[in-house]
Structures are given as structure tokens and as C-alpha cells.
Image (cartoon, grey):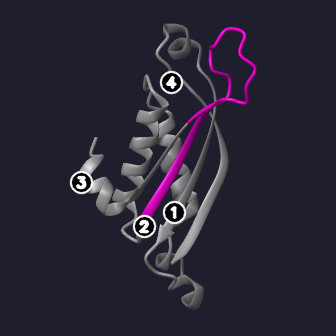
């Protein structure tokens, strides 16, 4: 089993339930952990034997550009996209953080939604 992580990707996006969040946007942080069924790239040194993390970044960026009310929904879309695009991924965990949630008087480092699913669990339970 091979694990690949893309940590703390930063995006300006328009997610939120309030009109001003969808209009003004805000900063979000996304981290992705992918487990692969194969560690072939460790021996082959070939990109096609793993996931291209530049493509992973681009796919996450595309999903972040599509507004949603809930960061939970964004996480679900990202997981679905990664499973669809990369058959080698057997398990995926996505964390989406709204860096500055609009909670009056709150002192916090952000609000996060994290979704972890195996390919089988996702196919059964999380189809969007």
C-alpha cells in the first residue's frame, strides 16, 4: 500500500450558506490523503504507475471553483472526482477547512469537514 499526501493547498472560493460568503468568497485549505492499491511506481519510476499529483491539484482546484453551501459537499465532490479519475486509489481522505468562518466573536483556526472513504464504501454510500 502506498500513501500520497497533498497538504494544505490554498484556494480562494465562494462556499457558504450566507449570501455574503457566496458573493465575497474566502480562503480555504484542502488536504488530500490517497492510498493506492499498488506501489509499482516505487520500482518502475513511471508516472503512469501512480497518481499524478499535479493533476490531483488541478482536480481539487476545479472542485473548489464550484460554489457549494457546505464544505461537507465540497469534500464529497473531491473524493468522488479522485476515485473517478484514478483507478489506483483504494482509499481517500479529504479535509476542507474554511479558514475564517463567519461566527461572530469566535476565536478559532477554522472550521473543517473531513471525509474518508474506501472506494467500495464510497460506491455504496456516497454517490453525489
Mark 1, secondary structure of its residue = strand
Closer to the N terminus: mark 1 or mark 3? 1
User: Is 110 drawn above or below residue 62 in the view shown?
Assistant: above
Q: Quadrant of residue 95?
A: top right
Magenta-drawn stretch contains 63: no
Residue bearing mark 3: 124
Residue at mark 2:
89
Q: Relative to 125, say whether 42 is above or below.
A: below
Label 3, residues with CA under 10 Å away: few <14, some 14-19, many ≥20: few
Nearest the viewer among 10 and 34 is 34
Which residue lies under the disc numbered 4? 15
Tell me the element at label 4.
loop
Q: Which residues are magenta?
A: 90-112
Residue at image x 32%, y 54%? Answer: 122
Extreme residue in the bottom direction: 43
Q: CA distance from mark 4 to mark 3?
A: 26 Å
Q: Nearer the viewer, residue 122 or 61?
A: 122
Q: Is residue 103 magenta?
A: yes
Front tag of 1 and 3: 3
Q: What separation in Å lies between label 2 and label 4 (alpha carbons)? A: 27 Å
Q: Are marks 4 and 3 in contact (CB under 8 Å)?
A: no
Q: Position of residue 34 (x, y in %)?
A: 51, 62
- CA distance separating discs 1 and 4: 24 Å
Q: Nearer the viewer, mark 2 or mark 3?
A: 3
Amino acid at each position: 500500500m502506498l500513501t500520497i499526501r497533498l497538504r494544505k493547498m490554498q484556494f480562494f472560493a465562494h462556499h457558504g450558506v450566507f449570501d455574503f460568503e457566496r458573493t465575497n468568497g474566502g480562503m480555504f485549505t484542502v488536504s488530500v490523503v490517497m492510498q493506492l492499491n499498488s506501489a509499482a511506481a516505487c520500482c518502475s519510476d513511471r508516472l503512469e504507475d501512480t497518481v499524478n499529483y499535479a493533476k490531483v491539484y488541478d482536480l481539487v482546484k476545479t472542485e473548489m471553483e464550484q460554489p457549494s453551501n457546505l464544505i461537507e459537499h465540497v469534500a464529497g465532490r473531491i473524493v468522488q472526482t479522485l476515485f473517478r479519475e484514478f483507478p489506483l486509489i483504494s482509499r481517500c481522505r479529504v479535509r476542507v477547512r474554511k479558514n475564517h468562518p463567519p461566527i461572530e466573536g469566535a476565536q478559532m483556526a477554522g472550521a473543517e469537514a473531513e471525509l474518508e472513504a474506501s472506494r467500495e464504501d464510497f460506491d455504496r454510500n456516497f454517490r453525489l
